[in-house]
Image (spheres, grey):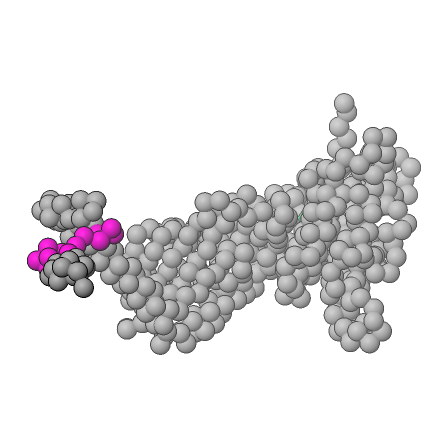
Amino acid sequence: MSSDDNQPLPPPPPPPTLHVPSPTPSQPQPTPSSPSLFGLDVLFSNPVFAGGMGLAGLGAAAAFSRRAAIRGVELLRRQMLVNVEISKRDPSYNWVLAWLAQPREEGGFLARRITRIRNLAITTSTRSINNAAQDSSDRATHADFRVQPGYGRHIIRHRPGVYIGVNREKASTTQTATGEPHETLTLTLLWMHRHVLSELFTEAHALSSRFHEGKTVVYTAKRMEWMALGKPRLKRPLGSVILDAGVKEGLVADVREFLAARQWYTDRGVPYRRGYLLYGPPGTGKTSFIQALAGELEYSVAMINLSEVGVTDDLLAHLLTQQPEKSILVLEDVDAALVNRKAREPDGYSGKTVTFSGLLNALDGLAAGEDRIAFLTTNHVERLDPALIRPGRVDMMVRIGEATRFQAAEMWDRYYGDIDLDKSGCERFIKRLDELGLFGDNADPAVPKRHTSTAAIQGLFQFNKNDMEGAINMAEGLIPRTFEA
Ligand code: ADP
C-alpha cells in the first residue's frame, strides 16, 4: 500500500439542495384578470364615480319597479276590466252614441251621466210638427239638441256604483270609404259589471228602434258606402200616393205575395228576388210610391242613381254586397246604363259610369244579393234593352203615367174633400181640365191633346190650400210649358 493511500479523503461535497423561493403570504399575488390590472379599482375608489354608479343603480331599480307596476296594472286591468271596442262601421256605434246622448230625468244628462268629461258634442235634429202634411214647404219644425260625448275619455255613471269608461277616438290615418276619418268607441267596465253591457246594447237598440218607429230610412250611395240620407223620414202613407185605378193595389199585392212565398223559392232553388220596373214621365209618383211601399212594409230604401257620374260597375257590385238589411233596392234612371253603353262605343269603356252588363250583373249575376226586392225606374222605357225584362231581373213592368181623371178626382178629394161636401167643386175641376185637353182625349179637334202630371196638380192644390175656387181658376197653369231655345 503506498503512503498516498494513507492520506485522509477530502470531505464529500454537500448534496445539492433544491431552492424553492417561499411565497410571501402578506402580499396577494395579482391575477391577470383582476381589475386592478386596468386600474378600475381606482375608479371605484373615486367617490364621484361610486356615487354615479349608485344613482344609476337606483334609476335602474326605479325603472324596473315602474315597468313592474305598469305590468301589474295591465294585468289587473286584464283581470278586472272588460273593454268593448265598437267601430263606426258597426250599426251599434250610432245606437250607443244615441244611448249616451239620451236626456236623463233628474238634472239632465250632464248631471247624472257624465262625472268626468273633457269634450262634448252636440247633435241637432229637426222634425216637422205638422205630421200630416207630407210635402208642404212651410211646415213648422222643432229642433232637438242632444249632448253626447265628444272625442276623448269620459267616465259615466250608469247607475249608483256602476261606472263606464268611454273612449271615443278618431283615427288619424284610416279613413272610411266616404273619406271621413274612421272612429271607434271603447267602453270599459269592471269585469264584475260585465252584465251591464248586454243591458246597455239592448237599451240602445230599443232606443234606436223607437227612434225609427213610424219612419223610413233612405240610404244613398256615398262613394263606397251606404249613407242614410238625412234623418229618417216620417213614413209616407200609401194612401197619399195616388196612382191610376188599381195600379197601386196590384203592385202592393204582388210584393206582399212575394214576401209570403220565400219557402216556394227555397224549395225550388230559385233565387229569392223580385224586380219591378216603373216607367213613365217624371213627376208621376214613382219614387213617392216606392217610399210609401217601404214604409208600409217596414223596410228602408237603398237608392242608387245610375245616371250619376262615378257610379261604376265595380261600385254598383260592391254596394249590392253591402245593401242595408231589410231594404228595397231602387235603381233610378236605369236607361243611363244603356245610354252610356252607346256613348262609349267609339272610344271604349270610360270607367266612370255603369255599363249594361254591370247592371245585369247587379240584377241577377254574381253581384246580385239573395233575398231582394228591386225597383228600377226610368223616364225613357224606349231606351231599354229587352234583355233587361226577364224573370229575376224585371218580373213586372208598370207604367206610371200622366194624371188621369181618376187621379185628379182622388187628389181633389184628399185636399178639398172636407169642404167640397157635395162634390160639385170636384166635378167643375175635372170639367175644366177636360176643356183644357189635359187628359189627352178631348174630342174637339180645336183642343190640343196634352197631359199634366200629378206633381203639377199637387203643386196647384198646395198653392191654393183650402181654396178650391182658386184651384179651379188657376187650372190653366197645369198646361205644360214648352221652352223655346
Ligand atoms: P217621379 O219619381 O215619378 O219623378 P216623384 O214621386 O218624385 O215623381 O214625385 C214628385 C212630387 O210630386 C212629390 O212631391 C210627390 O209627392 C208628388 N207626386 C207626384 N205624383 C204623385 C202621385 N201620383 N200621388 C201623390 N203625389 C205625387
* Residue 185: image location, x then y, percent: 43, 58
Q: Is residue 481 above or below residue 338?
A: above
Q: Quadrant of residue 12?
A: bottom left
Position of 39 with respect to 311 (left or right) is left
Residue shown at 20% from the left, 50% from the top: 35
Q: Main secondary structure of the magenta part?
A: loop
Tell me, yes or no, if residue 442 can be seen here.
no
Residue 181 visible from this viewpoint = yes
Percent x, y of residue 484:
77, 25
Q: In this view, does 83 lie to the left or right of 366?
A: left
Where is residue 276 shown, x and y percent of the image? 79, 57
| Number of callouts | 0
402 or 123: nearer the eye?
123
What is the x, y in percent for residue 48? 11, 44
Residue at x 63%, y 65% (from the top left corner): 298
Residue 82 quadrant: bottom left
Most distant residue in the top direction: 485
In reply to whether residue 29 is colored magenta, the answer given is: yes
Q: Does the magenta stretch include residue 299?
A: no
Please give the range of residues in magenta. 21-34
Q: In this rendering, would 332 be left or right of 29?
A: right
Q: Which of 14 and 312 is in front in this view?
A: 14
Residue at left 49%, top 44%? 173
